[in-house]
Amino acid sequence: MALPQPSAVLQLLKPVTWFPPMWAFACGAVSSGQPLGERVGLLVSGIVLAGPMVCACSQAVNDWFDRHVDAINEPQRPIPSGRIPGRWGLYIAIAWTLLSALWAWQLGAWAFRATLLALALAWAYSAPPFRFKKDGWIGNAACALSYEGLAWITGAAVMLGGAMPDAHIITLAMLYSLAAHGIMTLNDFKSIEGDKQMGVWSLPVQLGVKGAAGTACWVMLLPQLVVVALLLAWGLLPYAVAVLLLIYAQTPLMMRFMRDPVGRALSLSAFGVPLLVAGMMVSAFAWRNAPQHLLSFETQPFSFSLAQSSGALACNT
Protein backbone atom coordinates (compact mmCIF):
# COMPACT_ATOMS: atom_id res chain seq x y z
CA MET A 1 0.00 0.00 0.00
CA ALA A 2 1.32 3.45 -0.93
CA LEU A 3 2.30 5.63 2.00
CA PRO A 4 0.82 9.13 2.44
CA GLN A 5 3.02 12.12 1.72
CA PRO A 6 4.24 13.86 4.91
CA SER A 7 3.08 17.22 3.56
CA ALA A 8 -0.36 15.73 2.93
CA VAL A 9 -0.53 14.40 6.51
CA LEU A 10 0.29 17.88 7.82
CA GLN A 11 -2.42 19.36 5.62
CA LEU A 12 -4.84 16.72 6.89
CA LEU A 13 -4.16 17.79 10.49
CA LYS A 14 -4.78 21.47 9.51
CA PRO A 15 -2.41 23.44 11.77
CA VAL A 16 -4.29 26.65 10.96
CA THR A 17 -7.27 25.32 12.95
CA TRP A 18 -5.26 24.61 16.11
CA PHE A 19 -5.19 28.21 17.31
CA PRO A 20 -8.76 28.53 18.76
CA PRO A 21 -8.56 25.65 21.30
CA MET A 22 -4.95 26.52 22.17
CA TRP A 23 -6.02 30.12 22.81
CA ALA A 24 -9.04 28.99 24.84
CA PHE A 25 -6.85 26.74 27.00
CA ALA A 26 -4.50 29.68 27.59
CA CYS A 27 -7.49 31.88 28.52
CA GLY A 28 -8.55 29.28 31.05
CA ALA A 29 -5.06 29.15 32.51
CA VAL A 30 -4.96 32.95 32.83
CA SER A 31 -8.45 33.16 34.34
CA SER A 32 -7.51 30.59 37.02
CA GLY A 33 -5.50 33.27 38.84
CA GLN A 34 -2.65 30.86 39.47
CA PRO A 35 0.99 31.93 38.96
CA LEU A 36 1.76 30.75 35.43
CA GLY A 37 5.53 30.98 35.84
CA GLU A 38 5.45 28.13 38.34
CA ARG A 39 3.38 25.94 36.02
CA VAL A 40 4.97 26.55 32.62
CA GLY A 41 5.32 22.84 31.94
CA LEU A 42 1.62 22.21 32.57
CA LEU A 43 0.66 25.23 30.47
CA VAL A 44 2.75 24.15 27.47
CA SER A 45 1.59 20.53 27.71
CA GLY A 46 -2.03 21.65 27.89
CA ILE A 47 -1.69 23.94 24.89
CA VAL A 48 -0.11 21.12 22.89
CA LEU A 49 -2.95 18.83 23.96
CA ALA A 50 -5.62 21.32 22.87
CA GLY A 51 -4.11 22.10 19.47
CA PRO A 52 -1.67 19.64 17.84
CA MET A 53 -3.30 16.68 19.57
CA VAL A 54 -7.09 16.93 20.06
CA CYS A 55 -7.88 19.56 17.44
CA ALA A 56 -5.62 17.88 14.87
CA CYS A 57 -7.36 14.59 15.63
CA SER A 58 -10.78 16.15 15.04
CA GLN A 59 -9.60 17.49 11.67
CA ALA A 60 -8.36 14.07 10.57
CA VAL A 61 -11.62 12.43 11.64
CA ASN A 62 -13.64 15.08 9.83
CA ASP A 63 -11.65 14.80 6.60
CA TRP A 64 -12.04 11.03 6.51
CA PHE A 65 -15.80 11.04 6.96
CA ASP A 66 -16.20 14.11 4.72
CA ARG A 67 -14.12 12.75 1.86
CA HIS A 68 -17.18 12.45 -0.40
CA VAL A 69 -18.31 16.01 0.36
CA ASP A 70 -14.76 17.30 -0.09
CA ALA A 71 -14.61 15.61 -3.48
CA ILE A 72 -17.25 18.15 -4.53
CA ASN A 73 -16.30 21.23 -2.50
CA GLU A 74 -12.52 20.87 -2.12
CA PRO A 75 -11.17 18.12 -4.42
CA GLN A 76 -7.62 19.29 -3.70
CA ARG A 77 -7.88 18.09 -0.08
CA PRO A 78 -5.42 15.28 0.81
CA ILE A 79 -7.90 12.38 0.79
CA PRO A 80 -10.02 13.08 -2.32
CA SER A 81 -6.88 14.13 -4.24
CA GLY A 82 -5.27 10.75 -3.47
CA ARG A 83 -2.23 12.19 -1.69
CA ILE A 84 -3.41 10.21 1.34
CA PRO A 85 -4.30 6.91 -0.33
CA GLY A 86 -6.50 4.02 0.70
CA ARG A 87 -7.66 4.02 4.30
CA TRP A 88 -4.66 5.93 5.64
CA GLY A 89 -6.90 8.86 6.57
CA LEU A 90 -8.85 6.61 8.95
CA TYR A 91 -5.67 5.08 10.37
CA ILE A 92 -4.22 8.51 11.09
CA ALA A 93 -7.45 9.60 12.80
CA ILE A 94 -7.40 6.51 15.06
CA ALA A 95 -3.71 6.89 15.85
CA TRP A 96 -4.11 10.57 16.74
CA THR A 97 -7.05 9.72 18.99
CA LEU A 98 -4.93 7.27 20.97
CA LEU A 99 -1.96 9.66 21.12
CA SER A 100 -4.21 12.46 22.40
CA ALA A 101 -5.61 10.29 25.17
CA LEU A 102 -2.11 9.17 26.15
CA TRP A 103 -0.87 12.78 26.20
CA ALA A 104 -3.82 13.84 28.38
CA TRP A 105 -3.09 11.11 30.91
CA GLN A 106 0.06 12.90 32.07
CA LEU A 107 -1.93 16.06 32.89
CA GLY A 108 -4.12 14.43 35.51
CA ALA A 109 -7.61 13.03 35.86
CA TRP A 110 -9.48 16.21 34.94
CA ALA A 111 -7.56 16.75 31.70
CA PHE A 112 -7.89 13.05 30.81
CA ARG A 113 -11.67 13.01 31.28
CA ALA A 114 -12.09 16.30 29.42
CA THR A 115 -9.97 14.96 26.56
CA LEU A 116 -12.04 11.80 26.30
CA LEU A 117 -15.17 13.96 26.07
CA ALA A 118 -13.57 16.19 23.41
CA LEU A 119 -12.49 13.15 21.40
CA ALA A 120 -15.96 11.62 21.68
CA LEU A 121 -17.45 14.88 20.38
CA ALA A 122 -14.93 14.94 17.52
CA TRP A 123 -15.95 11.47 16.37
CA ALA A 124 -19.67 12.06 16.95
CA TYR A 125 -19.46 15.31 14.97
CA SER A 126 -18.21 13.59 11.81
CA ALA A 127 -18.84 9.86 12.03
CA PRO A 128 -22.08 7.91 11.71
CA PRO A 129 -24.40 7.06 13.31
CA PHE A 130 -24.43 10.42 15.09
CA ARG A 131 -22.73 12.68 12.52
CA PHE A 132 -23.76 15.86 14.34
CA LYS A 133 -22.50 18.01 11.50
CA LYS A 134 -25.51 16.97 9.40
CA ASP A 135 -27.46 19.56 11.41
CA GLY A 136 -25.82 22.98 11.60
CA TRP A 137 -27.32 23.81 14.99
CA ILE A 138 -26.16 20.64 16.72
CA GLY A 139 -22.85 20.20 14.90
CA ASN A 140 -21.68 23.77 15.41
CA ALA A 141 -22.68 23.59 19.08
CA ALA A 142 -20.64 20.41 19.63
CA CYS A 143 -17.65 21.89 17.85
CA ALA A 144 -17.86 25.23 19.68
CA LEU A 145 -18.18 23.52 23.06
CA SER A 146 -15.12 21.38 22.42
CA TYR A 147 -12.95 24.11 20.88
CA GLU A 148 -13.77 26.94 23.27
CA GLY A 149 -15.72 26.11 26.44
CA LEU A 150 -14.21 22.74 27.25
CA ALA A 151 -10.69 23.91 26.41
CA TRP A 152 -11.11 27.05 28.58
CA ILE A 153 -12.49 25.15 31.59
CA THR A 154 -9.81 22.47 31.25
CA GLY A 155 -7.08 25.11 31.17
CA ALA A 156 -8.37 26.59 34.40
CA ALA A 157 -8.82 23.19 36.05
CA VAL A 158 -5.30 22.04 35.15
CA MET A 159 -3.81 25.21 36.63
CA LEU A 160 -5.94 24.71 39.76
CA GLY A 161 -4.53 21.24 40.31
CA GLY A 162 -7.63 19.45 39.08
CA ALA A 163 -10.15 21.47 41.10
CA MET A 164 -13.43 22.58 39.55
CA PRO A 165 -13.19 26.22 38.35
CA ASP A 166 -15.67 28.58 39.95
CA ALA A 167 -18.95 29.63 38.36
CA HIS A 168 -17.56 32.91 37.02
CA ILE A 169 -14.91 31.12 34.93
CA ILE A 170 -17.43 28.57 33.66
CA THR A 171 -19.85 31.36 32.74
CA LEU A 172 -17.23 33.19 30.67
CA ALA A 173 -16.23 29.93 28.96
CA MET A 174 -19.82 29.06 28.07
CA LEU A 175 -20.57 32.55 26.73
CA TYR A 176 -17.60 32.43 24.41
CA SER A 177 -18.60 28.89 23.39
CA LEU A 178 -21.93 30.32 22.30
CA ALA A 179 -20.17 33.05 20.34
CA ALA A 180 -18.00 30.37 18.71
CA HIS A 181 -21.18 28.78 17.31
CA GLY A 182 -21.42 31.81 15.04
CA ILE A 183 -17.76 31.48 14.10
CA MET A 184 -18.36 27.87 13.05
CA THR A 185 -21.20 28.99 10.80
CA LEU A 186 -18.80 31.21 8.86
CA ASN A 187 -16.95 28.07 7.74
CA ASP A 188 -20.11 26.68 6.16
CA PHE A 189 -20.51 29.34 3.46
CA LYS A 190 -17.70 27.84 1.36
CA SER A 191 -19.38 24.43 1.06
CA ILE A 192 -23.04 25.17 0.41
CA GLU A 193 -23.29 23.27 -2.90
CA GLY A 194 -21.61 20.12 -1.63
CA ASP A 195 -23.65 20.20 1.59
CA LYS A 196 -26.88 20.37 -0.39
CA GLN A 197 -25.91 17.43 -2.57
CA MET A 198 -24.76 15.29 0.37
CA GLY A 199 -27.65 16.10 2.71
CA VAL A 200 -25.66 18.17 5.21
CA TRP A 201 -28.06 20.69 6.75
CA SER A 202 -25.66 23.48 7.56
CA LEU A 203 -27.20 26.80 8.58
CA PRO A 204 -26.69 28.36 5.12
CA VAL A 205 -28.59 25.39 3.68
CA GLN A 206 -31.35 25.55 6.33
CA LEU A 207 -31.80 29.31 6.62
CA GLY A 208 -30.52 30.52 3.29
CA VAL A 209 -27.41 32.63 2.82
CA LYS A 210 -28.81 35.86 4.27
CA GLY A 211 -30.59 34.17 7.16
CA ALA A 212 -27.51 32.21 8.17
CA ALA A 213 -25.31 35.31 7.90
CA GLY A 214 -27.57 37.32 10.21
CA THR A 215 -27.81 34.44 12.67
CA ALA A 216 -24.03 34.02 12.74
CA CYS A 217 -23.49 37.72 13.45
CA TRP A 218 -26.03 37.92 16.26
CA VAL A 219 -24.79 34.68 17.82
CA MET A 220 -21.29 36.15 17.85
CA LEU A 221 -22.36 39.57 19.17
CA LEU A 222 -24.89 38.85 21.92
CA PRO A 223 -22.68 36.68 24.18
CA GLN A 224 -19.96 39.33 23.99
CA LEU A 225 -22.43 41.98 25.12
CA VAL A 226 -23.41 39.76 28.05
CA VAL A 227 -19.72 39.49 28.95
CA VAL A 228 -19.50 43.30 28.97
CA ALA A 229 -22.51 43.47 31.29
CA LEU A 230 -20.98 40.89 33.64
CA LEU A 231 -17.64 42.69 33.78
CA LEU A 232 -19.46 45.90 34.66
CA ALA A 233 -21.44 44.08 37.35
CA TRP A 234 -18.18 42.72 38.77
CA GLY A 235 -16.74 46.23 38.98
CA LEU A 236 -14.21 45.71 36.21
CA LEU A 237 -14.93 48.82 34.15
CA PRO A 238 -11.62 49.08 32.19
CA TYR A 239 -11.93 45.49 30.98
CA ALA A 240 -15.59 45.97 30.08
CA VAL A 241 -14.69 49.03 28.01
CA ALA A 242 -11.90 47.10 26.26
CA VAL A 243 -14.27 44.26 25.27
CA LEU A 244 -16.88 46.80 24.14
CA LEU A 245 -14.35 48.52 21.89
CA LEU A 246 -13.43 45.17 20.36
CA ILE A 247 -17.12 44.54 19.67
CA TYR A 248 -17.40 47.99 18.10
CA ALA A 249 -14.50 47.15 15.77
CA GLN A 250 -16.26 43.96 14.64
CA THR A 251 -19.53 45.59 13.61
CA PRO A 252 -18.42 47.25 10.32
CA LEU A 253 -16.86 43.95 9.24
CA MET A 254 -20.12 42.18 9.98
CA MET A 255 -22.10 44.78 8.05
CA ARG A 256 -19.90 44.25 4.97
CA PHE A 257 -20.24 40.49 5.43
CA MET A 258 -24.04 40.80 5.48
CA ARG A 259 -23.98 42.44 2.04
CA ASP A 260 -22.10 39.48 0.51
CA PRO A 261 -21.99 36.52 2.91
CA VAL A 262 -20.45 34.00 0.54
CA GLY A 263 -17.83 36.36 -0.79
CA ARG A 264 -16.87 37.90 2.57
CA ALA A 265 -17.16 35.04 5.06
CA LEU A 266 -13.42 34.44 4.82
CA SER A 267 -12.73 38.15 5.37
CA LEU A 268 -14.84 38.21 8.53
CA SER A 269 -13.09 35.08 9.76
CA ALA A 270 -9.68 36.59 9.07
CA PHE A 271 -10.23 40.07 10.53
CA GLY A 272 -13.35 39.97 12.74
CA VAL A 273 -12.84 36.71 14.60
CA PRO A 274 -9.40 37.75 15.96
CA LEU A 275 -11.10 40.73 17.59
CA LEU A 276 -13.60 38.39 19.25
CA VAL A 277 -10.91 36.05 20.56
CA ALA A 278 -8.89 39.02 21.78
CA GLY A 279 -11.90 39.79 23.96
CA MET A 280 -11.62 36.28 25.39
CA MET A 281 -8.15 37.01 26.72
CA VAL A 282 -9.22 40.42 28.02
CA SER A 283 -12.05 38.70 29.91
CA ALA A 284 -9.65 36.07 31.24
CA PHE A 285 -7.32 38.76 32.60
CA ALA A 286 -10.35 40.60 33.98
CA TRP A 287 -11.35 37.65 36.13
CA ARG A 288 -7.72 37.00 37.05
CA ASN A 289 -7.67 40.48 38.61
CA ALA A 290 -11.26 40.36 39.89
CA PRO A 291 -11.13 38.27 43.10
CA GLN A 292 -9.57 40.97 45.25
CA HIS A 293 -12.13 43.52 44.02
CA LEU A 294 -15.06 41.16 44.57
CA LEU A 295 -13.74 40.07 47.95
CA SER A 296 -13.45 43.70 49.01
CA PHE A 297 -16.92 44.48 47.72
CA GLU A 298 -18.49 41.47 49.42
CA THR A 299 -16.77 41.83 52.79
CA GLN A 300 -17.25 45.57 53.29
CA PRO A 301 -20.92 45.30 54.37
CA PHE A 302 -20.05 42.44 56.72
CA SER A 303 -17.13 44.38 58.22
CA PHE A 304 -19.33 47.42 58.70
CA SER A 305 -22.07 45.47 60.46
CA LEU A 306 -19.49 43.70 62.60
CA ALA A 307 -18.03 47.05 63.68
CA GLN A 308 -21.51 48.36 64.49
CA SER A 309 -22.28 45.27 66.58
CA SER A 310 -19.01 45.63 68.49
CA GLY A 311 -19.76 49.29 69.21
CA ALA A 312 -23.26 48.51 70.39
CA LEU A 313 -21.94 45.76 72.64
CA ALA A 314 -19.39 48.19 74.15
CA CYS A 315 -22.13 50.80 74.82
CA ASN A 316 -24.39 48.25 76.43
CA THR A 317 -21.55 47.12 78.64
Image: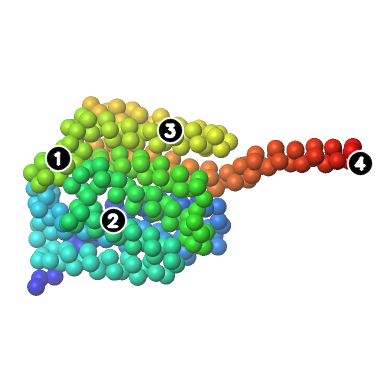
Amino acid carrying label 1: it is: Ile
Q: Is residue 41 above or below residue 225?
A: below
The answer to whether residue 253 is seen in the rendering is: no
Residue corresponding to mark 2: 121
Amino acid carrying label 3: it is: Leu
N-terminal of the pair, mark 1 or mark 3, is: 1
Which is closer to the viewer, label 4 or label 2? Answer: 4
Q: CA distance from mark 2 to mark 3?
A: 28 Å
Considering the image in quadrants, where does the C terminus appear?
Answer: top right
Residue corresponding to mark 4: 317
Q: Residue 139's x, y, as percent?
A: 25, 47
Q: Residue at x 23, y 53 (%)?
A: 125
N-terminal of the pair, mark 4 or mark 3, is: 3
The answer to whether residue 265 is seen in the rendering is: yes
Residue corresponding to mark 3: 225
- Circle 4 crowding by C-alpha within 10 Å: few under 14, some 14–19, many from 20: few
Q: Residue at x 38, y 60 (%)?
A: 114
Amino acid carrying label 2: it is: Leu
In the rendered structure, are the residues bearing label 4 and label 3 in contact, judged by CB atoms less than 8 Å apart? no
Residue corresponding to mark 1: 192
